[in-house]
Image (spheres, helix red, strand yellow):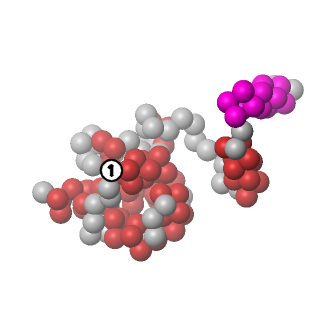
Amino acid sequence: MEKKLATTVGEAARLARMRAGLTQADVAARVAVAPEVYGRMERGKMLPSVPTLLRLCLALRSNPDELMGITPRRGGPGESPWAEDVPSELDDTPEMRRLLRSLRRLKRQQIKLMHLVATAIVTR
């Protein structure tokens, strides 16, 4: 049963990765595993841990049921309950990563203020 599950997770991850237009190295970086480890997962040679499975679901914008073969695989990334919106082309740029690193250092009140500023900028 474990081998069958590993194969199912690997095939679903590969299809979701290809649907998202990502490379194995892209997914490995987003999931925080070595590219070789992700490659073994995708080939069905190993199962991800539960925390890694969660990160994999988020990175591939898939739900765990889909990756484990409990529900049928879906067509679009927006159909996953784990995904909000399809990311824009700016989501994975160095500028966005720097901004996110800066925001993570802010306190809750500062984040609320930054949200108000961003909302004001976007609505103009």
Task: Please state if 122 lies on the left or on the right of 10 as rendered.
Answer: right
Is residue 117 among what the camera can see? yes
The picture places residue 31, in percent across and down from the top left corner, at 47, 57
Residue 96 position, x and y percent, is 72, 50
The amino acid marked with disc number 1 is Val
Within 10 angstroms of label 1, few (less than 14), some, or many (20 or more) residues? few
Question: Residue at 70% across / 44% down in the picture?
Answer: 105
Q: Residue at x 70, y 34 (%)?
A: 107
Residue 43, placed above or below residue 59: below
Label 1 residue SS: helix
| Overall secondary structure of the magenta section | helix
- Residue 37 lies, with reference to residue 67, above or below; the image says below
Q: Position of residue 30 (x, y in %)?
A: 52, 57
Residue drawn at x 72%, y 39% is 106
Report the residue that reaches farthest toward the left: 1
Percent coordinates x, y for residue 57 in the rendering:
42, 47
- Residue lying at the far front of the rendered structure: 107
Residue denoted by label 1 = 50
Residue toward you, 13 or 2: 2
119 in the magenta segment: yes
Q: In the rendered image of this protein, does residue 67 appear above or below residue 121? A: below
Furthest residue to the right? 124
Picture residue at 25% right of the left edge, 56% below the top? 8
Q: Work out which quarter of the rendered image holds the C terminus and state it.
A: top right
Does any portion of residue 11 appear in the rendered image?
A: no
Extent of the magenta region: 107-121
Q: Quadrant of the N terminus?
A: bottom left
